Every structure is written in structure tokens, then in C-alpha cells.
Amino acid sequence: MRFPLESAQDEDLGKNSIQNYSLSPNEHFKLGVENNTDGSIYVDLIVEKPLDREKDPFFGLTLMAVDGGIPQRTGTVQINIKVLDINDNSPHFTQSEYKVRLKENSPRDTLVTKVEASDLDFGSNAQITYSFHRVPKKLLNLFQLNEMTGEIIVLGEIDYEKETSYDMSIKATDDGGLSGQCKVFIEVEDVNDNAPEVSIISLRNVIPEDSPLETVVALFSFRDKDSGDNGKASCSIEMALPFLLKSTKNNFYQLVIQTPLDREKVSEYNVTITAIDRGSPRLTSTSIIHIQISDVNDNTPVFEKSLFEMRLQENNIPGLLLGSIYAVDLDTEQNGMVTYSILPGEIGTSPAASYISMNSETGNIYALRSLDYEQIKDFKITVRATDGGNPPLSADAFVRVVVIDENDNAPFFLYPLQNSTSPYNELLPKMAEAGYLVTKVVAVDGDSGQNSWLSYDILKATDPGLFSIGAQNGEVKTRRPLTERDSSKQRLVIVVKDSGVPPQTSTATLNVLLVDGFSDPYLKVVDVRQQDPEDEGTLTMYLVICLASVSFVFLLCIASFVGIKMCKKDHGSSFIVAPPHFPPAIPESCTDSQSGSLSRNYQYDVCLTNGSLTSDFRFLRPLIPVFSVADPNIPVNQRISSSSQEISDSIINKEEKNEGQASLSEDAAPRSGGPSCTVNQAIGANVNSGQNDWLSYQ
């Protein structure tokens, strides 16, 4: 028994079409190949050995169609065979061939022909259905078969110029699975309804954007299946394209480049070719050519901006991402692939590569080390973007990294100097009133901005209610007048705090010593050395001893002075001198630079200025004009200066011997018109008189 199989379809012609079929090996079936007069090949599945459904109810075969082209191509189909119970009669058509004539452009549902078949079996095995067999898909779109009646009607458009005739195979199948076949031949009658057709002979779909002018992109021709003027046509393309259409012999046309191409502006073109025949009415046809412009490396990378600014908090973690830069290259693929790099340069004295690194693919910039704002506030590097073309193109941009300050520096005292081993002392007169400026503390902060805004406060004090400090200027002032109950030594612990987050602080210690002001006629000099409270009792004892010694020396000097005056009066001296009033603390070792001894004809008034911040002698005034009896040829101002210096040295030496405790006094009133001298930890002299003899020191 033969079972017709569907033939394979191959759009190639001649030897390139289907040449043979083969079936997977089996013992029950084989192939029967039949060559038709029109070159088509029909394949039947032949039962070679009787089947037994109870033994082998199912067979799975593979049918392969092979063409004759080079390389050889194949197509396969799976054949599943199910063995049924016996049905030994197949349907038979009344005619083996049906021939029909049909005009082209026949309307839809036009009856083409009707086929009939009969079956000698009874029951369901005699019920016949009709179907197309071995029919190309294009025929299924043109014709429709009624499976119950066998009528064939027009379904699609019948075109003579596309196909002049059609042949199809109709299969009648009963319910038992047996079938019969017949042939239907349809001959199409022609009418004039064809427009010209454009045929592309050669086409370059992809052309480089730097292609020279007059480059041929496509070669095509046109044809019209009609005859006479209806078969003659002309071709054209739309305007505003960089292409030009040139005609050649035998209705051939060339599409060439007319103007330079730029892929970055237009990357592809759809060129519509229009062919118009000369018939009446005119018929037209169009053909669209798609042309893609390939890229060449003619664009450099472009950064978003020429200067990128990034901010970085100081004391950063190494490897921290600062930011990223991005450059765009209008080219594509490798030509548009951008890589980034940092150009050689220096940050301070070190290479930039030791501070900054860059991801060559993403453009991310990282900090390689921790930065310190106090050392580097900002720096600039140059980055380069390079594409992957050949030769590569590149562009540069600048990246400015600004280091943001962090509150990582504590304030530092300049006065009193922080961490100094020597104590800082300030003198305060006991007569000072409220608001008296004692001193001014000064601190600095290595940070900047808000982190360097400082405020001062008193952290600890011997007497918390005695002193106040300006929060902004650091001025230490008294809050109230001093009293006898106030300790002679006040200890202040001053704290300075910045405005950072979190704030940082530093402290400094300041000693304030309370000293007496003017006391008529005595001047009390207070030691400026640092003393502990437990030493005050010992100091009082020393002061009593010193006071008794000074009183004794003073009385001795008075007696000596009276004796000398009486002796001079007896010798008829013409000079009138005042009673001697020597500073009691002047040692006998003080000598004049000329005579080797201090003249006893000098009297001095030593005083402290009101509001002084130190305990040094501020003014030293000779009380009367005197002349040296040792050497009358030495000028008066020179003798005064020399004697003043000796007295100053004597006082300082005396203070050191008494552990800084001494007092000088005098009971004689200063005389007007005498020379004066000013002392501030040093003694000077001036020979002028009156107001002109008061000197100041810095």
C-alpha cells in the first residue's frame, strides 16, 4: 500500500531544487519517488511488509529531502504512523484530473470547480472529507476547498503576471484513514494590470562614512510584464538625499554618493526608488533600499565640562571614591569606547599618581591616601579620555579637588604659652577697681572657618567671683574691687574651645599676684616669683626681718648724713644740700662709674604707676640737682645716668638676695626742677626738668 507524503518545498530552481528523498531505515516501509513532467517530485510511503497493529501499533520515521546545490542542504520531517484496525477500501474520484480556465482578478468566492469521490465501505469508513494535498502555501491563500462538498472557490487575488497556471492535488479521505487523490489544473487568463517593477542587481548595504564621492552604492533595473507603452517606465528617487540616480544603457540605473556622509548626523538611509510606466492610466511601483553608514574614527571624546570640581573631607579613608567624570564619543563600537587616565603631574613635591587613581573604564576617581587640610587645601590634576580608534583620539580636562577642613586641631595658647615649663605671672594692684584689665590671653587654631572660631572661659579659679574673661577677645578683667581678704596669689585655669563638631579644647594656667600701689612715703615691692600658699607664713617672717633691717640702715644713714653736713658746714662749703634720704635697700657695693662709690648727695623717689600690670619699678627720680664732688669735669647728665644705673643694679641684686622681697621708701619730698629718670625693669636718666623728664618704656 502506498501512502502519499507531502513534498518538500524549495524556492531554488534547477539543480538547486529538491533532487531526492530518503527515509530512516525500517523493515515495514520504504519510499516511492515519482518524478512529474513539470519537474516536481512526489513521494509515497510504501508498506513493504504487512503490518500487525497488535505487534507494532506505532512507527516513527524521519523523511529527509536533499537538494542538489553546493553546499548541499537538507530538510527533515517526522512521520508518526499509527496502525489501525483493517480498512481495506479507499475513496476513488470520478475523474483523476480536472481542468479549469479562470480569469485573473476574479472576485472572491468565485466557484472554480467541484471534485467528487466515492468509497465502497460502509459506515464511518465511507464518510469522505476533502483536503488539499501537496499544495504550496501560496495556493492556500488563493483558493479555498470545502471539505464536505469538494467545491473550490477563489479566496485571494489571481494575477496572471505572477502565475499563469495552477495545479493542485485534492485528497479524499474516509473515516478509516484511507484516501484517494486527483489532480486539478487551473489555467489563468491574462488582463493588463501590471505596474513596472524595480529589480536590485547589486547593493552595498553598509558603506563607510568617509567614502569618496561618486561611489556606487546600488545597481538596479526595472521591468514591466505588460507590452507596448504599458511596459516602458522611468525611475527616480526623492530629493534631499546625499545620493544621485544615474541612468545607463538597457534600463540600468546606478545609485552614487553625491555629498559627503556623516554617520553622527544620519546613521542610515531608506532610499525609495519609484518606477512609473507610460500607460494610461499610469501605473507606478516603488522599491526601498536600506543603506547603513558605518563609523570611522573622526570624533574625539568630549567631556561634559572642561573643569570638574570634587570635594573631599580631610583625614579621609584611603581608596575613597571622590567622584567620576564622563566623556562622550559620538563614534560607535571600538571607535567610541573611551578609556580614562591621569596625566603625569605633581601635587606639592609628590607625583599626582601617589595621591589619586582612576578607573580607566568607568572614570571613577579615588583618593589613594589620607589628606590633611592644613597641608593641602586643594590641588588640580589633568585627566585624559582616549577612544579605541586607530589612530586613537583623545581630549583633556581638569579635575580640581578641594579638601574640606575637619575639626582635627585643638586650640593652642600663644599667651600664656601652652605647655611651657615657666609659669606665667601677672601683677594686679590691690587698688584696682571692677573692670580692671589684668591681661589678655591669645590662642590660635590650625583649622579654618567655623572650626577656628574660639571662645574663652575660666575653668577654675582661686576666687571664681573675682575675675571674668571675654568669651571672644580673651581679656581677663576684675569683676569687683579687691579687698584685704583676697589672697595675694590668684590661680586661673583658662579653657579655650573652638566651634567645631565635636569641639576641641585646651587649657592654660595663669598666676595673678596682688601687689600694693603707692603708700606715702613708703613703696612696697612685691615679689613676682611663683609662691605656693603654704610658703606664705615663711614669707611673712622674711618680710619682718627685712623691714627691721631696712629701718636700722635708714636710721644709720640719717645719722651719717647729719654728721657729714655738719662737717661741711664747718669747712664753709657753699653748697646747700638736703638731708640724706637713701633707698634703704641699696647695698654698699654700688659704685659710681667714675669715682668708685655712689655719691651721698643724691636722693631718689621710686614709685609704681597706678594700674601697672607688673611689679617692676616704673619711675626713678633724683630729688635735687647735684654735682659730683669726685670729678667736677664730668658732665652732669653722664654722672646722673651712671649713678642711676648703679642704683638700679643695686636694687635688683638686693631683691635677688632677699628672695625677691624688698621695699624702698623715702621721706623727703621731691624737689622741682631736678633731673629725672624712668625705670621699667631697667633704669634710664634724663637731664631735662619738670614734665620733660618723665620717660616711658616698651
Image (cartoon, rainbow, N blue to C red):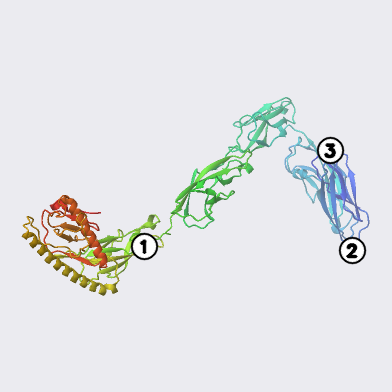
Separation (CA) of disc 2 from disc 1: 117 Å
At numbered mark 2, what does the secondary structure look like: helix, strand or loop? loop
**Residue assigned mark 2:** 54
**Residue assigned mark 1:** 420
Q: Quadrant of residue 551?
A: bottom left
Q: What percent of the width, then of the height, locates residue 355?
A: 52, 51
Binning the other alpha carbons within 10 Å of mark 3 as few (below 14), some (14 to 19) or many (20 upward) gives few
Judge by depth and name the residue closer to the eye, 519 or 65.
519
Q: Is residue 200 left or right of residue 177?
A: left
Closest to the camera, between mark 1 and mark 3, is 1
Separation (CA) of disc 2 from disc 3: 45 Å
**Residue assigned mark 3:** 14
- Name which of mark 1 and mark 3 comes first in the sequence: 3
Considering every residue shown, the one lying at the far right of the view is 49
- Name which of mark 2 and mark 3 comes first in the sequence: 3
Separation (CA) of disc 1 from disc 3: 111 Å
Judge by depth and name the residue closer to the eye, 375 or 366.
375
Quadrant including the C terminus? bottom left
At numbered mark 3, what does the secondary structure look like: helix, strand or loop? helix
Binning the other alpha carbons within 10 Å of mark 1 as few (below 14), some (14 to 19) or many (20 upward) gives few
Q: What percent of the width, then of the height, locates residue 267?
A: 61, 38
Judge by depth and name the residue closer to the eye, 116 or 389.
389
Number of marks in picture:
3
Q: Is residue 359 left or right of residue 478?
A: right
Tell me: residue 234, above or below residue 459.
Answer: above
Q: What percent of the width, then of the height, locates residue 545?
A: 21, 72
Amino acid under label 2? Glu
Binning the other alpha carbons within 10 Å of mark 2 as few (below 14), some (14 to 19) or many (20 upward) gives few
Q: What percent of the width, then of the height, locates residue 65?
A: 84, 47
